Amino acid sequence: MSRSAGIALVAVAAALWGLDAWIRAPLAQTTAVATIVFGEHLVLVVLTLPFLAGATAAVLRLGWRHVLAALVIGAGSSAVATILFTQAFVDGHDFVTPVVLQKVQPVIAVVAATMVLGERPHARFAAFFVPALVGAWLIGVPHPFHPSVHGLRPTLYALGAAALWALGTVLGRYLARDLRFEHVATLRFAFGLPASAVALLVLGTPAFASGHDTLWIALLAFVTGFLALGLYYYGLRSIPAVAATLAELAFPVSAILVGYFKFGQALSGWQWTGVALTSLVVVLLPAKPVERTALVPATAAV
């Protein structure tokens, strides 16, 4: 697969993640956050059960570093990060604050990719990275020169989710170099299920939702988990983590549009400018192959 195709697949997956709030935000009003996340992982483990034995054997053959990476992705990036992000919607007073704070994710991912994978972005990478960050900032902040974030707890939850998801991008690329894409996704769900079960016990929430909400949880798991992450890891095999984190900015674009069309979130002129700028960067990434314009390969640090 070409890197352009890989970037396009990651961007499509990220756009599907942005649709997540369409279902998750209303669900969080009637079902405990940990219950939603546990239900998602239960569905995802059932869907990927045929791959579990092969994925487990493959990662064990690769050694403890790969096992640890899978554990961090599953328990941290999949279970804990999803709980934190969902809780940010519950405790916050607006739709935008959690999305705003996700803007630190590309910065964390680029730093982590340098440290863990040895990736060294070419100087021309800034031509994508800087406009992408500016666009993402404008999307999330209605008044970009007078920013405000509502509430300490939703702020910390959203920042924690951003850090864990950034690590998930980098460690996902680390695993995707040596594992089949369906094995990476399977391990993510398999490690995420016990972590989400522990969260149920710690938070004292029920394991299962009502029949109505369970159907929506299953749909959420299939679209933003099984389908989106399948596309994501398939594309991630052929692109650097620093390119993937820019393609993932399709997420705030689709998320903010969900806020506008579904939840009636008013958008300022600056936010529409951010949507246009970020969308332009995501569209141009596949058009400008990463191997020629965005990255100077370096020896992996792990």
Image: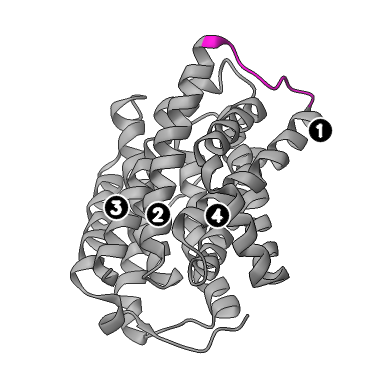
Q: Residues within 10 Å of mark 1 (few under 14, many from 20)?
A: few
Q: Position of residue 45 (x, y in %)?
A: 57, 38
The range drawn in magenta is: 204-211
Res. 202 mark: 1
Q: State yes or no: discs 1 and 2 in contact (Cβ < 8 Å).
A: no
Going from the N terminus, do you reach mark 1 or mark 2 first? 1
Side of 276 where 189 appears, left or right: right
SS assignment at label 3: helix
- Front residue of 153 and 161: 161
CA gap, disc 2 to disc 3? Answer: 24 Å
Q: Which residue is mark 3?
A: 274
Relative to residue 148, is residue 65 depicted above or below?
Answer: below
Side of 98 where 57 appears, left or right: right
Q: Nearer the viewer, mark 4 or mark 2?
A: 2
For the point 25% across and 58% down, the residue is 277
Q: State yes or no: discs 4 and 2 in contact (Cβ < 8 Å).
A: no
Q: Residues within 10 Å of mark 2 (few under 14, many from 20)?
A: many
Q: Amino acid at mark 3?
A: Gly
